[in-house]
Image (spheres, helix red, strand yellow):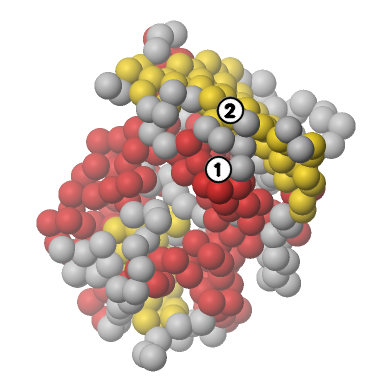
Amino acid sequence: MNELRFAAFGAGFWAKFQLAGWREIGGTKCVAIYNRTRSKAEALAREFGIPAVYDDPEELLCTEKLDFADVITDVDTHARFVKMAAAHKLPVICQKPLAPSLEIAEEMVRACAEAGVPLYVNENWRWQTPIREVSRILASGEIGKPFRARLDMISGFPVYVNQPFLKELKQFILTDLGSHILDVARFLFGEAKTLYCQTSRVHADIQGEDVATVMMDMDSGATVLVELAYAENFLERDKFPETCIFVEAERGSLELTLDFGVRVTTKNGTLIRKAPPPRFAWADPAYDIVHSSIVPCQANLLHALRGEAEAETRADDNLKTVRLVFAAYESAERNRTVRFR
Ligand code: 89Y
């Protein structure tokens, strides 16, 4: 089967791992890379054997013969590159968070629909091995219908070291991390009817909020609580970036614990499994669980690009996650519940 040729736009922290993910999967070839600072693109080009480097995105798009574009830049430039690629009739994959506002995210989806090209989101969190295991158990009916769930991603890990721009974001943890965890909440428990959120800032040297608590009433009737923090909270066991999940359901409960333990309790007792992610030599050990989830996420997107499967993380679906993120800011600002229906 022919390899799909793509160009990467962006050479920041995540680009390296997404490129490694594509190499791991096979079936694609990165033929060009763009970055505003050319030297950063050149460094990745050397590491991954990418033949062409550009600091002008339009020149890249006019010169290269491509099957898709992979946009891995900062959130503020996503719309620009997605629209450029769409104007060249190229399918696009865009990093999360899709956009700095719901309106811009909607415009991006519209631009791709009008150009007749698919827009996918590299939303990998839901592809983490233990989260897939939680989804499998819920779907099996083993514990019955969930009535309440809690999803926590709480850590003091200095995310600003690898991604310094996070310090400058006026809207930080809900866009950067909330995009992921609210997407997981939708993946596991469906859509929300209402949402209430509170936020605060613990770090004195950042612009945005680093603590957020979101409570949602889901269409299913379940209540879902999402707790996020990148505060300097000196946890006894800081396991960045593991998500802990606790689900209470009609016939049992389910817990995803630190170190990938999945504990299912029913009238028969507690069954304890482990669902560790695969380890890849190219992954940064501090981000193992997230970096490993790039592989199944991108594999799913590759199947979709080939027309062999539906993509789970289509941008039109991801708009519902983006809507939750910005509803959370609205709720926190006005201190009131946002109703979706
Ligand atoms: O940017 C974020 C992401 O997508 O995963 C973890 C992270 O690097 C810091 O929150």
Identify the residue shown where x is 82% and y is 30%: 235
Residue displayed at 58% across by 28% down: 250
Residue 231 versus residue 79 in the image, above or below: above
Which comes before the other along the chain, label 1 or label 2?
1
- Residue 316: x percent and y percent? 28, 48
- Look at the numbered disc 2 and give the secondary structure of its residue: loop
**Quadrant holding the N terminus:** bottom left
Please, what is the three-letter code of the amino acid marked with disc 2?
Glu
Percent position of residue 277, x then y: 69, 59
Q: Where does label 2 land, which residue?
A: 250
Residue 243 appears anywhere in the view: yes
| Contact flag, marks 1 and 2 (Cβ < 8 Å) | no
Q: Residue at x 44, y 81 (%)?
A: 28
Callout 1 crowding tier (Cα within 10 Å): few <14, some 14–19, many ≥20: few
On residue 141, the disc is 1
Q: Residues within 10 Å of mark 2 (few under 14, many from 20)?
A: few
